[in-house]
Amino acid sequence: MANISPLLSLIAILLSSIMINHLPVASSKQWCVSKQTAKDEQLEDNINFACSNGIDCRPILPSGACFKPNTTISHASYLMNDYYQSHGRTNEACLFYFPNSGILTSTDPSYNQCIYK
Ligand SMILES: *[C@@H]1O[C@H](CO)[C@@H](O)[C@H](O)[C@H]1NC(C)=O
């Protein structure tokens, strides 16, 4: 037994390092979305801000992949994130330009055909 134990330890170490190497790597990507507490008025301002600053707003039109759910908070989230992703992913691009209404998350908000950048 005394001779087997180091071998078992070695096997255990090898197995655990193999398992660790195969764990999904935690992504550090962040998305900018609407705060649940954001006011609709502010979210509408955010939508207008994004649409007049180079963001493609077609995905939130009735024919677009992100139209449903047809809510201001959902539409704003999609566009705010697009703005954030295409403006250097700085905290400022989410928190300053979308005051009291933008929040960063590390959970991908994509759903169905609506793919967040
Ligand atoms: C989407 O929501 C707006 C605002 O509530 C409403 O005026 C519009 O009729 C809705 N459109 C559809 C296609 O449900």
Image: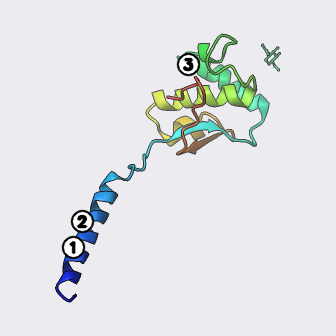
On-image quarter of the N terminus:
bottom left
Closer to the camera in the image, 49 or 22: 22
Q: What element carries label 1?
A: helix
Is 1 displayed left or right of 71 in the figure? left
Q: Mark 1 points at which residue?
A: 10
- Identified at 68% across, 25% down, the residue is 75
- Sooner in the amino-acid sequence: mark 2 or mark 3: 2
Mark 2 belongs to which amino acid? Leu
x 52%, y 32%: residue = 84
Label pair 1/3, CB-CB below 8 angstroms: no
In the image, taking residue 22 as reference, residue 47 lies left or right, namely: right
The picture places residue 37, in percent across and down from the top left corner, at 76, 43
Mark 1 or mark 3: name the one nearer the start of the chain. 1
According to the picture, the residue beneath numbered tag 3 turns out to be 53
Q: Residues within 10 Å of mark 2 (few under 14, many from 20)?
A: few
For ligand 1, the image quadrant comes to: top right
Q: How far apart are marks 1 and 3 (CA)?
A: 58 Å
Asked if 34 appears above or below 83 in the picture, the reply is below
| Dot 1 crowding, Cα within 10 Å, few <14, some 14–19, many 20+ | few
Residue type at the position of mark 3: Asn
Q: Is mark 1 within 8 Å of ligand 1?
A: no
CB within 8 Å, label 1 to label 2: yes
Q: Which mark is residue 14?
A: 2
